[in-house]
Amino acid sequence: MARIFCVANQKGGVGKTTTCVNLAAALAQAGQRTLLIDLDPQGNATMGSGVDKRAVTKSVYHVLVGLATLDEACVTSPSGGYDVLPANRDLAGAEVELVGLERRENRLRDALRASGADYDLVLIDCPPSLSMLTLNGLCAAHGVIIPMQCEYFALEGLSDLVNTIKKVHSNLNRELGITGLLRVMFDARMTLQQQVSAQLESHFGDKVFRAIVPRNVRLAEAPSHGMPGVVFDKAAKGTQAYMAFAAEMIERVRTP
C-alpha cells in the first residue's frame, strides 16, 4: 500500500512545486516507485517533470470528474524516472464541477484506491489556497509535508495551515497528520532565518526535518530545461539537500 503525502502551504512562492519535483526524482533514484500528482491548474510540477502540459490528452481533471482512470492518465517523467498525473488549464474548471458531484472531497482518494498501479510513495502538489482541489489532496493523504521559508510571515501562515489540517483530520480524514516541516530557500547568513529556524525546532521538535534546502540557483534553472534539479545538476548544494531529504523521508516511512 502506497504512503501518500501532500506538499502544502497556503502561502505562495514557498517552494512547494520545487520540493515535489525534486523529492519525487530523488525518491526514484533511491529505488522508490513514485507517483507525483499535480493538483495545481498552473501545471508547474508537470512541466518541471519534463511533461508538456499542452500535449497531454488526459489529466488529473479527467480523473477527478470521472472521465478517465488514474492509470489511463498517468505518464512517466522522461528525466525523473517517476510517474506523473499531469495538470493543465482544464483543472481550473474542476472547482466548479466538483461542487455538484458525489463524494466531491474524496474523488482523488477514490481514484487512487481504484488504481491497479503499485507505488511506494505518492506525492501531491497542492495549489496555494484552501480550495476543493487542496481538500481532495488532504483527504487522500496520510501526511502533510510543509515546505516553508524561515521568515516572520511564514510563521503567521503556518498556524492557519496547522488549524486547517486539524479540521480535516477531525471531520474528513482521520489518517491525516503533519509529517514534517521542511526549511527551504535557507540562507544561513541571515540572523532572522536562524532565529525562525530555532523557533521551529523548539516548537515542533522532531517534526522539523533535519535536511535544510539552501537558496540555490541551479534548482531555479532546472525547470527551464524540463527536468528536476537533482537530475539537472547532481553536484549542486540544493541537489545534495533534496537527496538527504529523500533519505529522511524513506526512513520515516519505514519507521512505524
Image (tube, rainbow, N blue to C red):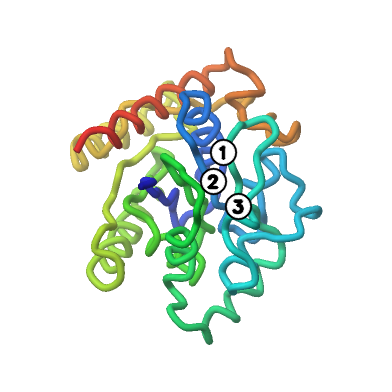
Q: In front of the other: label 3 or label 1?
A: 3
The quadrant holding residue 248 is: top left
Q: Point out residue 65 in the picture as x, y percentages from the top left corner.
A: 59, 74
**Residue type pointed to by label 1:** Val
Vertical placement of residue 4 versus 215, above or below = below
Look at mark 2 in the image and give the residue it sits on.
36
Look at mark 3 in the image and give the residue it sits on.
85
Q: Secondary structure at mark 2?
A: strand
**Residue type pointed to by label 2:** Leu
Look at mark 1 in the image and give the residue it sits on.
21
Q: Point out residue 211 in the picture as x, y percentages from the top left corner.
A: 37, 26
Could you tell me how far apart the alpha carbons at marks 1 and 2 are, in whole angstroms? Answer: 8 Å
- Tell me which residue sits at (68%, 32%) in the image: 227
- Tell me which residue sits at (66%, 60%) in the image: 59
Could you tell me how far apart the alpha carbons at marks 3 and 1 are, in whole angstroms? Answer: 12 Å
Circles 2 and 3, Cβ within 8 Å, touching? The answer is: yes
Marked residue nearer the N-terminal end (1 or 2): 1
Circles 1 and 2, Cβ within 8 Å, touching? The answer is: yes
Q: Point out residue 11 in the picture as x, y percentages from the top left corner.
A: 47, 54
Marked residue nearer the N-terminal end (2 or 3): 2
The quadrant holding residue 138 is: bottom left
Q: Point out residue 6 in the picture as x, y percentages from the top left corner.
A: 42, 51
Residue extending farthest top: 235
Marked residue nearer the N-terminal end (3 or 1): 1
CA neighbours of label 1 inside 10 A, class few (<14), some (14 to 19), many (20+): many
The quadrant holding residue 60 is: bottom right
